[in-house]
Amino acid sequence: MLEALYPLVRPLFFSLDAERAHTLVASMLALAHRSSAVRSAMLGAPSERLPVSALGHTFSSPVMMAAGFDKHASMYNALYALGFGAVEVGTITAQAQPGNERPRLFRLVEDRALINRMGFNNHGAAAARAAIAATPRAPGLVLGVNIGKSKACPVERAADDYAESARLLGSLADYLVVNVSSPNTPGLRSLQSVDALEPIIAAVRASLAEVGASPPLLVKIAPDLADEDVDAVADLALRAGLDGLVATNTTIARDGLGLRADAAAVAALGAGGLSGPPVRARSLAVLQRLRARVGSKLVLIAAGGIESADQAWQSVRAGATLVQVYTGFVYGGPGLARRLTQGLRDRMARDGFDAWEDAVGADAR
């Protein structure tokens, strides 16, 4: 039902402030999230399956909802019903925090892009744990948890902050992502340096061990890293025994907007992470560099500017086992996950791949 209505209601949503529109959508999805009957009536049953084995789980589709959409772990069942094989909730911080001042989310409609400086607004790890425990996930859903640094926590104590979130949420996560790449928390991106990241990974691992949890552990990196820093993170991931990397977060660059956006208007929006098609080329380049560095030893998840089956398939052939969307969902509507899954299945057949793992990294071999 929601999918059929979207072309009619999208003009209404886009007439509203971007964050207000997101809140309205979230309210509807949260209602469906809590009730399987409402979920079935509103969204139907999950369909367009393309099973993929990765990270110790079977994903019903390789198309995932990226972190940032379900910040409070209040919509994951509804998003699964829309066809996403996994939902990554968060980013969640150890401490509850309101995020940055509004307005902090902006549409660049002609570029099908977003700029956000949300600042990890969330209810905190304890509240997220309670929310997930209170609403069991729908059968078949893979639930990822993305954790970040609390703004109030000094950078030098970041490892302890991440460890606290891992302690509270690790046992509920099908996989856990350490986010050190958002541009909207002061000092956060400095944690991508190997010297800073290594103790964070160690602290998270120790915290998980304390509570007897062992979810696959990944790190999410920025597209703005220099090539040599991408290589260094890849080497650390192998050395530290990580299970995968997410490439990439949003970018602080604005050069990908081209001529479709008014430069003065974009500048007036201020700081924040740019997502959508303008980040696509760099995100793909980072993915390709990671695949060349780590081969098939890590699970690579592609994120950044994916809004079509051709783009998703390009990322798969470049080395991504799974792909994430967010901005594409805002513009493409609730049918996006199903369309991408169908498109990926068609491209597998077209290119002569019988097994998903044969397609992953095909262009890198």
Image (cartoon, grey):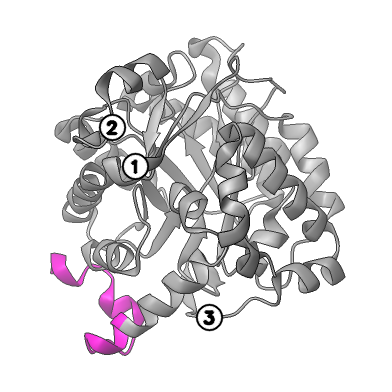
Q: Residues within 10 Å of mark 3 (few under 14, many from 20)?
A: some
Cα gap from disc 3 to disc 1, whole angstroms: 30 Å
Residue 6 in percent (x, y) is at 60, 60
What amino acid does circle 1 point to? Glu
Cα gap from disc 2 to disc 3, whole angstroms: 35 Å
* Marked residue nearer the N-terminal end (3 or 1): 3
**Residue of label 2:** 261
Of badges 3 and 1, nearer the viewer stands 1
The quadrant of the rendering that contains the N terminus is: bottom right
**Residue of label 1:** 110
The reply to whether the magenta stretch includes residue 352 is yes
**Residue of label 3:** 48
Dot 1 falls on a residue whose secondary structure is helix
Residue 259 position (above or below residue 252) = below
Nearest to the observer: residue 242 or residue 305: 305
Task: Look at 43% across and 53% down and name the residue there.
Answer: 328
